Image (tube, rainbow, N blue to C red):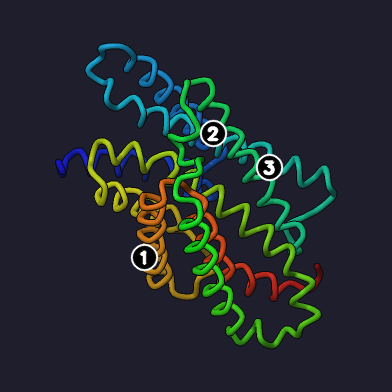
Amino acid sequence: MRLDLFVLLTGCSIVVFALTMTFVPLMPAWSNHVARAGLLIAFGALWWAARGQSPLGRFRPVFFAGLASVTGLSLGFYLGDWGLGLMGLTTSTPVGIAMAKFWQALLTVVGILMVAKLCGEDLASLYIRKGRLLAGLGVGLAAGAVCLLLALQQPGIKALGTARLLSIAPWALLFVLANGLMEELLFRGLFLGRYERLLGSWPAVLATALAFTLAHLQVTYAPDRVAFLLVTFGFAILWGWLMQKTRSLWGSALFHAGADLLIILPIFSSLRAV
């Protein structure tokens, strides 16, 4: 592995997610719009310039990944609230939070698939394929079940009572499944295979794990941010490894969804109304 190439590619994905996710709440509105437009223009121009026998040709898949990720995230950012408003919901209840995540995930995935279609990329290149389906589903479901059991052992969850827990369960499930699929496609489905061809297997896992972890730098729901980021990095390594081994994103998405239950169940339990 060339260290300079590893730093360049990792830095590229970190910048993409920093400007379209992580630091958006801290950015003035105008700079958010400018950053998104600038990234779209830059990646689109680079992707076009890298066609044929261009010296940039080997990086064309990476330019596509950047273009697709910014497009998907921007659709979710600009249109996500529209879907929530149409349903008359707010993000003050589990229902509203779950539906907001569903709309964001749907729009993000649609944006990515739309760009893939326009750029001539097939679904298999995004790990949307059968792969080792039984192995992926088996590991994903087993790991997700372990995460669920750990989530249910948290004192705040144990104190909820069966009726309250069952009332929030469908919305928690919708949230984690939508988020797990969206983030696995966004962070690994788009970038992992393309980085692997340039860097090798484990460096690609490491690069995508670093980008994923740093994208969560501004979380407000973790009492110990450093510990949270370390755990997130460990999970990201596992999800990347699982995606490579099963050659699809289904197992990683289920595992990811299970891990999100550790976070979303306590958040939902603190809200008064479903």
Which is nearer the N-term, disc 1 or disc 3?
A: 3
Residue sitting at x 61%, y 34%: 110
The residue to which callout 3 is attached is 80
Q: At which x and y percent is residue 32?
A: 52, 37
Amino acid, disc 3: Gly
The residue to which callout 1 is attached is 234
Q: Secondary structure at mark 3?
A: helix
Q: Secondary structure at mark 2?
A: helix
Residue sitting at x 58%, y 53%: 179
Looking at the image, residue 45 sits to the left or right of residue 250; the answer is left
Measured Cα–Cα span from mark 3 to mark 2: 15 Å
Q: At which x and y percent is residue 2?
A: 14, 41
Measured Cα–Cα span from mark 1 to mark 2: 26 Å
Image quadrant for the N terminus? top left
Of residues 66 and 148, the one nearer the viewer is: 148
Amino acid, disc 2: Ile
Q: Dot 1, crowdedness within 10 Å: few (<14), some or many (≥20)? A: some
Q: Secondary structure at mark 1?
A: helix
Of residues 208 and 37, the one nearer the viewer is: 208
Give above or below for 51 relative to 75.
Answer: above
The residue to which callout 2 is attached is 112
Give above or below for 270 relative to 106.
Answer: below
Q: Nearer the viewer, mark 3 or mark 2?
A: 2
Residue sitting at x 70%, y 51%: 100
Measured Cα–Cα span from mark 1 to mark 3: 30 Å
Q: At which x and y percent is residue 12?
A: 33, 38
Which is nearer the N-term, disc 3 or disc 2?
A: 3
Q: Quadrant of residue 45?
A: top left
Q: Quadrant of residue 258?
A: bottom right
Q: At which x and y percent is residue 217?
A: 43, 58
Amino acid, disc 1: Gly
